[in-house]
Image (cartoon, rainbow, N blue to C red):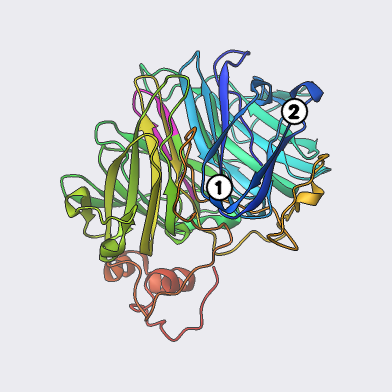
Amino acid sequence: MVTFMHNGNSDVSSGANFLYVSPEDDGSFTIDAPGHSSANKLHKFVPIDILDTNRTTQFEIPAALEMSAGTLIERKGILVTSYGNLSVYAFNENQAANSQDAYNAIPIEALGKFYYVPTVRNNPAFTVTAVQDNTTVNITLKTKCSVDWEQKTYTNGGIITVRLDIFEVFQLSLKGACDLGGTTVSSDHPVSVTSGSSCATLKSGQTCSHVVEQLLPNELWGRRFIVPSLDDINESKIRMISSKESRFTVVTEHHKDGTSHTRTHPIAGDQAIDMVVPPGTVTEIFNSEKLHVTKIGLGNSSYIISIPHVDGYGWNYTVTPLNNQYGNNYTNYLSILAYTDALDSLTINGVHPEYHHWRSVVDLGYSHGIFLMSNGTSYQIEASHPFMAQAFGHSSHGAYAFNAGSRFDHLPSGGYMIRPDQIPTTSKPHTAASPNPTFSPSTTSLSPTSTSSASSPSIISQTSTSASITGCKDDVPNCQEVDNTLNICKEPVAAYKYCRKFCKLCDSPGIIG
């Protein structure tokens, strides 16, 4: 389920909204958006044959399906369904304001019933979209500002309750320094949540810019994160939210001059914590409780991007650089954070990158590389060990960033599965691919491009499970230091995941965290 948050600092949007769909299997898919009326109803049925698989197709979405300005409910959700796996991603640009961002769509199976909203500190906004009828949503505010809704005024700790049917979207948007970080969204059925700003100004002299990310539910958060640098010139900001008070949070900054320093950074539950990171810095975050981590770019134009935890890395991705057919062309880059010992197995379109492209972060055991992407070319990246891939780009007027994909070793409890024959549309997809299809767009590839195709196999599915690595080994190279600082061997779940050999858990049958 995809939603286009309002983009811009005026009540009227001049946005260009696009969905990019890349099928992994033959069959068919549909894009449905009933809209407010028949005038803005959208229904597209797209057959796929084996020659079309992994081909990225761009669909321009009517401007009427972008959310209006303000705090309101509108029927503007967009549902993409398929009998096979899809990569689905969204791009929104306000042409008048040169304001844009992109995100990869999370499959309905991975949606949950409880979220923490990070937003940003200036002009914050978020959306909640229902994927089934009669969904009750409770929003508990964390803000120093007030929210007016249905002739009532809500302040910090206030609970706004709304009822949504499928395709309906509740958008909460504030103006000014009204941070909503730490606000919670709970519901009786799974919902889709995006977070960001219609038009944020995040540093002095910066042009206001739309920023957006789709959130993972709390159940899919993690404890260890590595935040690569996407910019060697401008500083960035990292925002962390923990659902519980952390017993410890260790942050290690690995600077581009080879130096590093470690600090503890305690996090209270339900609180958004920001820290500014120097240009070119790779940051490791290790927390006793599960976290959500967002990176905020602070260049001439802002972007936000959710950082996957290390257990959410995949083995292969397909990425196509984003380019705007309306003339705002980007310089596009591919960022890869890979396990140093597995670099010999990593290929981009079948070619091993030369070693001078990599910056080794010795204490982490990972290496980071940034590669220029050519417009109109798709990039297939594969390795024998899970790695993180992100795409980003900038022009003289704006910037964007998104994850190439995510992997889930489990799905939220009580999740929702939707079949194409449950969609309220007059034309049902037809395929012989599966006798019992489910809605299953993978979250693995953001490849915004208007006509490019990928001839390589598509990347990981959203239902991929963790693969065991042969033998018993530690997943981090500095377990002695980690144990000295964190007593990780006394934390069974973290010890099993990251320092299994050092903590003498090789014979353990497994621990679920």
Res. 253 visible in picture: yes
Which of the image's four quarters has the C terminus? bottom right
> What stretch of residues is rendered in magenta?
292-303
Residue 419 screen position, x and y as percent: 76, 53
Q: Which mark is residue 52?
A: 1
Label drawn at residue 159: none
What is the x, y in percent for residue 73? 74, 28
Residue 436, quarter of the rendered image = bottom right
- Residue at point 62% right, 46% down? 115
**In this picture, is 495 found above or below 91?**
below
Give the mark nearer the N terminus: 2 vs 1.
1
Name the residue: 37% across, 72% down.
Answer: 499
Task: Give whichever of 140, 352 is nearer the camera.
Answer: 352
Residue 509 to residue 201: above or below = below
The residue that label 2 is drawn on is 73
The residue nearer to you, when weighing 486 against 4, is: 4
Dominant SS of magenta comes to strand
Query: Is 230 or 460 nearer to us in this picture?
Result: 460
Q: In the image, is 324 to the left or to the right of 283?
A: right
Using residue 310 as the reference point, say whether residue 166 is left or right of it. right
User: Considering the numbered disc 1 on the image, is that residue within a helix, a strand or a loop?
Assistant: helix
Which callout, 2 or 1, points to the residue nearer the camera? 1
Q: Amino acid at mark 2?
A: Ile
> Can see residue 121?
no
Quadrant including the N terminus = top right
Give how far across and how far down residue 341 sits, in percent.
26, 66
Task: Tell me if 505 is positioned left or right of 155 in this view.
Answer: left
| Crowd rating for badge 1 (residues with CA inside 10 Å; few <14, some 14–19, many 20+) | some
* Image quarter of residue 400: top left
Secondary structure at numbered mark 2: strand
User: In the image, what residue type sits under mark 1?
Assistant: Asp
Q: Is residue 310 above or below residue 236?
A: below
